[in-house]
Image: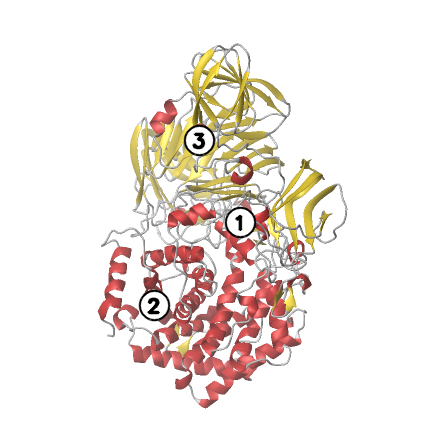
Amino acid sequence: MGGGGTEVLINRRQFLYATGLLTLTPSISLAQVKDTYYEVLLRHTRWAETQYDAAAGRYRRTDFGFAVVLGNAVLLTRGSYDAALAGVEKDVLRQHTLATIRHFAASNVLAGGTEWGKTLFWDTTFQSYFVLAARLLWPELDAATRSNVEAIARGQADYTTSLGTGNDPRSGGWTPNGLIGGFRGDTKLEEMGVYAQSLAPGLAWHGDGPGWREAFGRWSRNEAGLPAADLANPSTVDGVPISANTATNLHDTYIVENHGSFGPHYQSELWRTSGRNAVHFLLAGRPLPEVLTKQPNGELLWRTILATMSDAGEPLMPMVDDREHLYGRDVIPLAFRSTVLRDPMAARAEASLASRLLAYQAHPPVYRLAKFSGEAKYEPEARAELAISYLLHELRPPAKPMSEQDFFAQAAITIDHGAEPGLLTHQSAAAWVGTVTKPGFTKFAWQPAHDDWLFKISGATPMLLPPAAVTGRDTVVYQRVRDGFDATASLLRFADGFAGTATLPTGTIVCALPRPGRVDVRNLAMAGMPGLTGSRTYTGVAGRVSVRAREAFRVDELTFPAVSARHVRMVGVRPHPTYGYSLFDFEVDGSLERGKPTNASSFDPGMESLKATDGDPATRWAVARAERGRADSWLAVDLGAATTISRVRLRWETAAAGAYRIETSPDGVAWTAVAEHPRPDLSTPGWLDVDGRAGFVARSAEPITVQGDMITLPAGVVEGYVRADLRAIAAESAPECPPLVRASTADGFLSLFNLSNDSVTGVVRLRGTRLYRGTQVTTTNGTEYALDMPAATVRIEPPWFTARGIPAGITAVVHDARRVTFRGGPARFTLTHRNGGTMPVVLGRAERTVTMPGAKAFPFNDLALGRVTFPHSVLPQGMSDPAAAVDGEQRTAWTPGRDGRMVVDLGAPHAIGKISLKWTDGSEPPHTITYSTDGKTYGPATAARYVAVSTGWRPGHASLRSISVTGGDPVG
C-alpha cells in the first residue's frame, strides 16, 4: 500500500465527510481539487477492474471499457498510489493496463487491425484517451506498440483531413452538415468538435501533417458559429479572420439544443473537446493552437451556462432528462476553463463540483462517476475525463476561485432565449428560475439557493404549470441597467386558458395557476450531500411531517375498513410518465390472491397479469407498451368466493403509479372504491415550508398537500420564497383585483397578470403605502392602484417609493424611479426611496412634483442598454470591449481601435427612432451608423435588430461612452 503524509490525510478526511462520518460544509481548497481527482480515480479503480476480462487478459471492448487505461496511467505515473483504496495492487494494475494498450494498439484499424478505431463517431473520442494513456506510459511500451500508437494518431489525422468537409462514411448518419452546421433541435457544435478532436493527437505528437492544422482550425473556429456575431468580428485566430466562419450552430440567443431541447451538457461540449485537445499539446510540449484560448463566441456560450448554473458547479437542466447529475462527466469543461482559460468563475464552479465528488461516488452504485442517467460508455469516459482534469491542473495552474456569493452575484442575469428554444431564464443571487415553454417540457422550474438536489425539474417532469402545450407566450425581461431591477414575467396561453409567471430579484417566484400545480421533491440518502439526509421535512399550519426517502422499489401498504368481496383490483389514475404501470406483487390480506385467476387491461409479453399474484418476487406484470400512456389501466384478482378483506400490499417496479385506487366487487361488474393512493401526508392551508430550504404561500382557500415526495399547490396565486417567515407572509392581505386579473405583492413588487382575452381597467386594492409606477390613491389602510392592462399581458412594478405617514385621499402619480406628483393636500409625510434615500414632503392644495436626489429615472427608454455587442469573446487588436458603450456607466467607454466597428444586438427587430452617440473628451472619429435585420447585410433602415457603428478611429480620437437607441415595440 502506497501513500502517507499530508495528501493522504486530506483525502481520508474528505472521504469520511463523504460517507457521513464527518459533517462539513462541502468545501475544498484550490490545492485540494487535483488531490480530490486523484483519490476519486483511485476509488473508481474498483469499478474499472470489473471491466477486466481475465480470460482475455485485457479490459473489455464493450462500451469502450478499455478506456479505463487513461485513469490507470495517471495513477501509475503520478501521485501516491494507494492499493487499499484502489482495490488492486499497483503492479497488477500496471500489468492489466500495459496488456490492454498492447492489444488495442494492434487491433486498431489505423494500425492494421480490425477491432476498432478510425470511425469518427465515437471511436475517435476513445482514441484520444487511448493515445494519451499510451504517451503517459511511453517508456514502458515495446517498440511495436509505440509504432502502432503513432500510426493511430497520424492515420486518424490523415483520414479526417481527407474527408474535407464531408461526412465520415464509417459513422452512419452522424454529420456536421459540412461547414454550414445546424442548430435546430440538434446542434452541430458537438459534431464539429469531434472532427477537430480527431486531429489533435496527430498535431500534438507529430507536428503538422499535410492539411492537418488547417482542418483543425477550420472545424474548431466554426464549433460555436453564429453568422451575426462572426461576420461582425474581424479578429484573426490562428491567422484566419473569425468573419470567415460559415457555421450556424447556435440559436441567436447563444443557446444550443440537442436531442430536441436545450442541453447544457452539449453547450459545454466546446470546452469538453478543448480540454481533451489541450492536454495532448501540453503534454507533448507544443504551443496550444490559438483557437483553444480564443474561442469565437465562447464567452457568450459560457454566459448561458452561468445563467443556469447550480451550487454544485453543474448547470441545471430543465429540459433534457438523461444527462443530469453526471458529475464525473461535467468536470472537464470546468477544469479546462479554470486552468487553460484562467477563468475564476469556472474555478469556483469546479471547486464546488469537486467538493461533492466523493459524496457522489460513495452513493450506490458505489464508486461510479456517471450515476442516475446517461449511456454505459459514459462511465469509462468519466474516468478518462477526470484523469484529463487532473493533468490539466498539473500542467496549468488554475485561476483562484471567487467566493460562491460573488459567483452568483456576477452570474445574475435575465435572458429570454425565445419561443423556439422555449426558455425564459433568471439567475439571481438567491435562486435560479426558468419558465419553460418548449413542447413536451412545459414547467415553471425553480431551484431556491441554486440547489440542484431540491426540486425535480428535468425532462418531462412538470412543475407548477400545466404539463400541456403552450399556444402563445407574452414575455417581459427586466434588466437592472435599464429597469433598475432584474426580473422576468410571462403570460402563457393554453388551449383552455392562461397561466402567469413572475421572477423577482430576491429569488422569489409568483405564479398565477389556472388549476392545481405540482412540485416533485428529490429525496435521497446521499451522505455528505447538502439536503440529502434520507428524508424531507414539511411544515405548515396543520403541523409537521417527515417523509423518508425511498431507496428501492416502492412498496405501498393500504388499509381500509373491512369489507366482504370476491374481486379486488387496482385501477390506475396517474401512470409513470414513461413506463405506465408494473407490479411485482399484488397481495390481498397476506396471500389470499396467491394462484387465483388474475387479469388486466393489458400486458406486455412475458409479463402477464398472473405474474403479480404468483408469489414469485422476481416476476412482474406490466402494461402493454402501447398502453403505457393510458391512465386507467387495471389489474384484478378473483379470490374465488366472498372474503372479508381490509388490506392490500403493492410492490411496484420502476413503473410505479403516481396515483391509483383500490376497488372491490361481489361479482366483477359493480365496483366500489375502498382506498386511494397517495393519501396526503400533510394537508395544510396557506403556507408550506420545504425542509427549511424553501417554501410556498398559496393565496387560496384550498389547502396545500404533501403526498410522498410530491407537493400539490392549489389554483390561484402561488408565491415561492427562499427561506422566509412564511407564516407572517401568509398572514398579509392579498391584493383585491378585478375579475380575471391576479396580483401579488411578494417582496414588495407588484406582479400583475391579465388572464383574459380582453383589456382590463379598474383598480387593485393594496395594503400599505408603497407607491408603484402609475397612479394610485391612498386609503385608510393602503392604496387603490389604477389598472389598465392590455389583453393577456403581464408586468411587474417595483416599489420605488414608500410614503410613510401619508393620509387617505392623496393621489400619487409615480412617473419613474425619481419623480412623483402628489395631489389632494394639505398633507405632510416622508417619502422613502427603494435605495434608502428619504425626503420630507409638504403638500399644499396645489399639486406638487418631487424628485428624489441621487435616484436614477428608471426605466430608461433605450433599446441598446444591457444588450449583447459584437465583437465578443475575441477582440481585434487595439479594441476594448464594446459592451462598455451599453453598460449605462459613465466611467467606461469603448475604444474602437484602428477603423474599429461595433454592433449592438437589440434582441429583436424594432422600429428605430433616434440614435445618440456620446464620446469622451477629444476629437470624435469619423463614423457612420448602419442597420440590419439579420446581422448579415447592413445599410439604411427604419427597423432593425442590429445597429452598427463603423469608425475611422486613430490614436488620439475620442472613445465612445454610450450608444443610445430609442424606438418602438418589436416588429415582425
Q: Quadrant of residue 192?
A: bottom right
Q: Which residue is mark 3?
A: 719
Spot occupied by residue 343 in the image (x, y as percentages of width and height):
45, 59
The residue at 29%/56% (across/down) is 18
In the displayed orientation, state which residue is furthest to the right.
Answer: 940
Q: Does residue 360 appear in the picture of this structure?
A: no
Type of amino acid under label 1: Arg
Give x and y (percent) for residue 880.
Answer: 57, 56
Mark 1–mark 3 Cα distance, whole angstroms, equals 39 Å
Crowd class of label 2 (few under 14; some 14 to 19; many from 20; radius 10 Å): many
Secondary structure beneath disc 1?
helix
Kindly indicate the quadrant of the structure image that contains residue 847: top right
| Nearer to me, 97 or 884 | 884
The residue positioned 60% from the left and 19% from the top of the image is: 761
Q: Is tag 3's residue or tag 2's residue first in the polypeptide sequence?
A: 2
Residue depicted at x 26% and y 52%: 24
Q: Is 285 located above or below residue 491 in the figure?
A: below
* Residue ranking furthest to the bottom: 143
Q: Is residue 177 above or below residue 681?
A: below
Give the residue type that dot 2 points to: Tyr
Residue that carries the numbered disc 1 in the rendered image? 625
**Which secondary structure, mark 2?**
helix
Q: What residue is rendered at 68% in x and 47% in y?
A: 947
Residue assigned mark 2: 38
Between marks 1 and 3 in the image, the one whose residue lies nearer the viewer: 3
Q: CA distance from mark 3 to mark 2?
A: 44 Å
Pick the front one: 636 or 833: 833
Q: Amino acid at mark 3?
A: Glu
